[in-house]
Amino acid sequence: MVTVEVGRQAVWNHCKEAGISDDIALIAKYFDIKDICVIFNGKMTYIHERPRKLIRVPANPVKIDYKACIQATKDAARRYK
């Protein structure tokens, strides 16, 4: 079970616990951060909105024959000439 906390102070404490507070501060220096969610060590903290549930699918490497793709586009271009 994941512990959920809400609020700016809870998020900063959780970032310090995760060791990413310096990184978040550097990002906030250059970009306007409206909301942040940190999930680490069985705990989730966020400022305003709870993150949407996502199903993450691992990426499987796919070997693409680039030469065949390029040849197919060249063949199509020859037909139109």
Image (cartoon, helix red, strand yellow):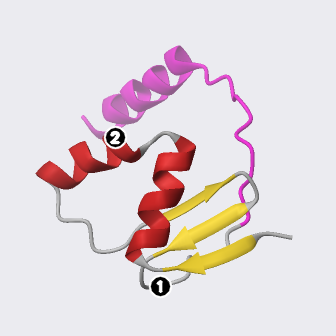
Asked whether 72 or 64 is in front, the reply is 64
Mark 1 secondary-structure assignment: loop
Q: Quadrant of residue 12?
A: bottom left
Which sits earlier in the primary sequence, circle 2 or circle 1?
2
Asked if the stretch drawn in magenta spans residue 54, the answer is: no
**Position in image of residue 36 (x %, y %):** 41, 67
Mark 2: give few (<14), some (14-19) or many (20+) Cα within 10 Å: few
Q: Is residue 33 left or right of residue 16?
A: left
In the displayed structure, does residue 6 sit left or right of residue 75? Answer: right
Task: Name which residue lies at 21% across and 55% down.
Answer: 28
The answer to whether one can see residue 31 in this image is yes
Q: Residue furthest right?
A: 1
Q: State the residue at coordinates (38%, 46%).
A: 21
> Circle 1 sits on which residue?
49
Q: Is residue 60 above or below residue 16?
A: above
**Three-letter amino acid code at the position of disc 1:** Glu
Q: Which residues are magenta?
A: 55-81
Q: Identify which amino acid the numbered label 2 is placed on.
A: Asp
Residue 66, position as x, y percentages in the image: 52, 20
- Cα separation, mark 2 vs mark 1, equals 21 Å
Q: Which residue is mark 2?
A: 23
Pinpoint residue 4: horizontal percent, then vertical percent.
Answer: 67, 76
Q: Is residue 52 visible?
A: no
Residue ID at (17%, 56%):
31
Where does residue 54 sit, x and y in percent of width and height?
Answer: 67, 69
